[in-house]
Amino acid sequence: MMRFVLLATLGSVAVLGGAYAFQHLGGMAPCKLCIWQRWPHATAIFIGAIILFTGEVKLAWLGALAALSTALIGMYHVGVEQGWWEGPTSCTSGGVENLSAEQLLDQILAAPLVRCDDIAWQLAGISMAGWNAILSLVLVALWIKAARTA
């Protein structure tokens, strides 16, 4: 059971470490939704550390919830990237119809540096948000396996 906790915890360490590597080594600044996806991984790492030090494996349900949270945010982000739905107005482009030149200039100047609806990197046609969702669902399964073997 502790093996599954360790694997799930290290999985979040790897995903979060990868995100920071893309940011600091690859020069790819994260958007707002990317940052939102990081917090549940940090929470899962903290939960994993508590379990590994205390042996309270029942807390693995909280790890599963954290991993599920980041998977859902990742799926939402993929939908924003694909144009299936609009993302937060603070990190996506908006329409320009019915805007005066002054309003359009204000919109351009207020635009975030990194937009949530742009795909900055992808592998096999899957964006980083998509990979986060996929890998996080695997982590959910590991956390659940740990919790059920408690």
Image (tube, helix red, strand yellow):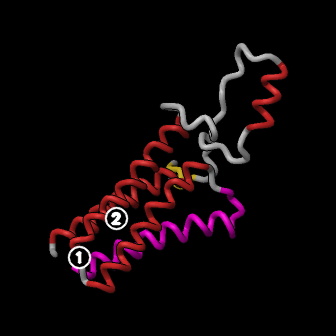
How crowded is the residue under tag 1: few (<14 C-alpha within 10 Å), some, or many (20+)?
many
Number of numbered discs on residues: 2
- Name the quadrant of the C terminus: bottom left
**Residue 22, relative to residue 91: is it above or below?**
below
Q: Point out residue 22 in the picture as x, y percentages from the top left corner.
A: 63, 64
Disc 2: CA contacts within 10 A as few (<14), some (14-19) or many (>=20): many
Indicate the quadrant where residue 12 lies: bottom left
**Which residue carries the number 1 mark?**
57
The magenta stretch is 1-29
State the residue position of label 2: 139
- Image location of residue 54, percent across then percent down: 29, 84
In the rendered image, which quarter is residue 48 located in? bottom left
Q: Position of residue 93 (x, y in %)?
A: 66, 33
Q: Distance between the Cα atoms at labels 2 and 1?
A: 15 Å
Amino acid residing under circle 1: Val
Residue that extends furthest to the left in the rendered view of this protein: 149
